[in-house]
Image (cartoon, helix red, strand yellow):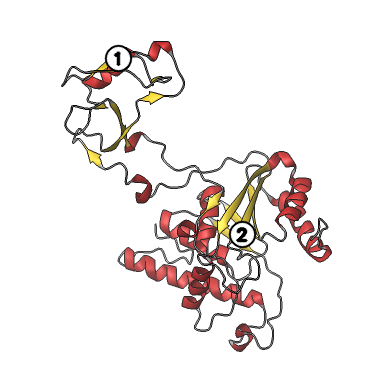
């Protein structure tokens, strides 16, 4: 754009962002997905409307898992998600996965559960924490590495040794390490500014999701539900109201219903979409849809029915049947 705003784009997005700010709760946040053509312009607009101080993050989402061989310059595999808060937004932690927990592979059968070995020394040097630790099995004394100290004082280390909280290797003859128990780590993961397609899906996955709902996919460029579920996990509580004012094929509604089904939440959604007419020769028109709104409404119906069926299969027919997708 050579540093200039695209007039049509600006006229479309600016008033919606202004209204969105007014609609946000004080602890609310707005997530805006954008490609690299307009991310700079969008940030300038959001800085003006929401204030630079309310910028939260610019996330890079890896939306394509393969490069385009027909790209003339670079194959673009990244989209961006800008986050702005209104005032008092506090992000949620993401749930830990088994992949993240797999390092906690030991269990001493002491009632503390799974643990992994961790460094007992720290880079912040303290003379009070610089002392030898004696392996009670071998009598060998170990000092912290040069320039480092142990993470706590001598009395605490001796107590940890008595409580079997210090690990001296599988044969008991090694240097001291800390037993880091899974139950004691933070109950969740801090979101990062890079979202992989392994965690948040990709464009091909999004198209397959729509294809599985419709015999003839009527929408060309949907977002994966896992991307919108990631956004909802970070930015919403279980009883939040989620608004999407570029709802397209209603992926956000699908994601909210799916997330409610998985965690028993009671999130609600509002989808806003201009009734853009489907092109005469498009797959949507061939399938009988006059505009994009009709596609979105039909997706909500079909996704809700599919989620309820999955709920019934998991709960032996005891899903609540209210159309929300909630299995609780």
Query: Could you tell me residue 56's position as x and y percent?
Result: 64, 43
Instruction: Tell me which label, 2 or 1, sits earlier in the chain.
Output: 2
Q: Tell whether 176 sits left or right of 138.
A: right
With respect to residue 303, does 134 lie above or below? above
Q: Tell whether 6 sits left or right of 195.
A: right
List the single residue furthest toward the top. 128
Q: Which residue does the image show at 22% across and 38% down from the upper left?
A: 107
With respect to residue 57, does 251 lie above or below? below
Query: Could you tell me residue 73's position as x and y percent?
Result: 65, 67
Q: Crowding at label 1, few (<14), some or many (≥20) Cα neighbours within 10 Å?
A: few
With respect to residue 234, does 154 lie above or below? above
Q: For the C terminus, give its image quadrant.
A: bottom left
* Residue 236 in view: no
Q: Nearer the viewer, residue 302 or 48?
A: 48
Q: Which residue does the image show at 81% across and 55% down from the upper left?
A: 3
Q: Nearer the viewer, mark 2 or mark 1?
A: 1
Q: Nearer the viewer, residue 284 or 60?
A: 60
Question: Which residue is identified by label 1?
Answer: 132
Q: Tell whether 105 sits left or right of 302.
A: left
User: Disc number at residue 241?
Assistant: none
Question: Which residue is identified by label 2?
Answer: 79
Q: Crowding at label 2, few (<14), some or many (≥20) Cα neighbours within 10 Å?
A: some
Q: Nearer the viewer, residue 136 or 35?
A: 136
With respect to residue 156, does 185 lie above or below? below
Image quadrant in which you'd find residue 34: bottom right
Q: Nearer the viewer, residue 194 or 264?
A: 194
Query: Could you tell me residue 42's position as x and y percent?
Result: 73, 54
């Amino acid at each position: 754009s050579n540093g200039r705003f695209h007039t049509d784009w600006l006229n479309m997005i600016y008033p919606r962002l202004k209204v969105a700010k007014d609609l946000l709760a004080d602890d609310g946040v707005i997530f805006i997905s954008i490609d690299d053509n307009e991310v700079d312009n969008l940030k300038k607009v959001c800085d003006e409307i929401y204030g630079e101080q309310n910028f939260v993050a610019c996330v890079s989402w890896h939306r394509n898992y393969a490069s385009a061989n027909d790209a003339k310059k670079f194959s673009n595999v990244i989209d961006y998600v800008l986050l702005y808060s209104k005032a008092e937004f506090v992000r949620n932690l993401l749930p830990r996965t088994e992949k993240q927990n797999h390092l906690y592979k030991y269990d001493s059968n002491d009632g503390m559960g799974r643990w992994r070995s961790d460094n007992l020394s720290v880079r912040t040097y303290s003379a009070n924490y610089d002392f030898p630790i004696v392996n009670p099995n071998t009598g060998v004394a170990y000092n912290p590495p040069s320039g480092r100290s142990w993470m706590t004082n001598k009395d605490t280390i001796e107590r940890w040794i008595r409580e079997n909280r210090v690990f001296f290797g599988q044969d008991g003859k090694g240097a001291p390490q800390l037993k880091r128990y899974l139950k004691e780590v933070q109950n969740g993961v801090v979101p990062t500014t890079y979202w992989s397609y392994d965690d948040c899906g990709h464009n091909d996955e999004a198209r397959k999701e729509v294809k599985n709902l419709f015999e003839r996919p009527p929408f060309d460029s949907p977002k994966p539900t896992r991307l919108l579920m990631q956004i909802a996990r970070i930015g919403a509580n279980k009883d939040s109201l989620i608004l999407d004012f570029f709802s397209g094929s209603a992926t956000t509604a699908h994601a909210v219903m799916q997330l409610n089904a998985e965690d028993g939440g009671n999130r609600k959604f509002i989808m806003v979409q201009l009734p853009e007419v489907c092109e005469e020769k498009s797959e949507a028109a061939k399938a009988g849809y006059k505009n994009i709104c009709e596609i979105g409404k039909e997706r909500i119906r079909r996704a809700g029915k599919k989620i309820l069926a999955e709920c019934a299969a998991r709960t032996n027919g005891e899903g609540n049947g209210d159309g929300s997708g909630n299995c609780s």
